């Protein structure tokens, strides 16, 4: 079974990976990924603040079926995607552990 630290690190790395797939770090005004894993409960909070003129990676933007028009919505969508990716990564971590 993965340790709490492994779970937190896996989730944080997955979330940051999604953020940096969409934005260059230098383009972000601010971002924060907070992950806790206590008593088997994963909590992921992702905040992304990108300026209006920040350009997203064209390939990353394609993941949106109905791409939001303004940067605030884009940043919120990226934060939501990052949080989901963190949860998926942790699910995969536990699934891989069960296969062993």
Image (tube, rainbow, N blue to C red):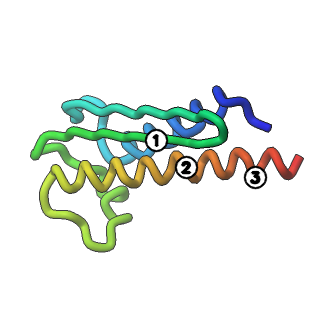
Q: Are marks 1 and 3 in contact (CB under 8 Å)?
A: no
Q: Label 1's element?
A: strand
Closer to the chain start, of discs 1 and 3, is: 1
**What quarter of the picture does the N terminus occupy?**
top right
Q: Residue at x 30, y 56 (%)?
A: 77
> Viewer-proximal residue, 47 or 65?
47
> What's the CA distance linking mark 1 and mark 3?
19 Å
In the rendered structure, find residue 44 and report the number of the disc placed on it: 1
Residue under the image location 59 percent in, 42 percent down: 41
Tag 2 residue: 87
Give x and y (percent) for residue 95.
Answer: 75, 52
Is the Cβ of the residue at disc 1 closer than 8 Å to that at disc 2? yes
Residue 18 pos. (x, y %) = 42, 46
Mark toward the viewer: 1 or 3: 1
Asked where in the image residue 50 lies, by quadrant, the reply is top left
| Residue 57 image point, x, y percent | 30, 51
Determine whether the residue tagged by mark 2 lies in a helix, strand or loop: helix
Q: Which one is in front, 81 or 34?
A: 34
Q: Which residue is mark 3?
A: 95
Q: Dot 3: what SS?
A: helix
């Amino acid at each position: 079974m993965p340790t709490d630290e492994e779970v937190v690190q896996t989730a944080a790395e997955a979330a940051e990976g999604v953020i940096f797939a969409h934005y260059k770090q230098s383009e972000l005004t601010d971002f924060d990924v907070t992950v806790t894993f206590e008593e088997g409960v994963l909590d992921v909070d992702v905040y992304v603040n990108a300026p209006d003129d920040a350009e997203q990676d064209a390939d990353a933007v394609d993941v949106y079926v109905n791409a939001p028009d303004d940067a605030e919505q884009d940043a919120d969508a990226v934060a939501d995607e990052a949080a989901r990716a963190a949860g998926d990564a942790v699910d995969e971590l536990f699934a891989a552990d069960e296969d062993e």
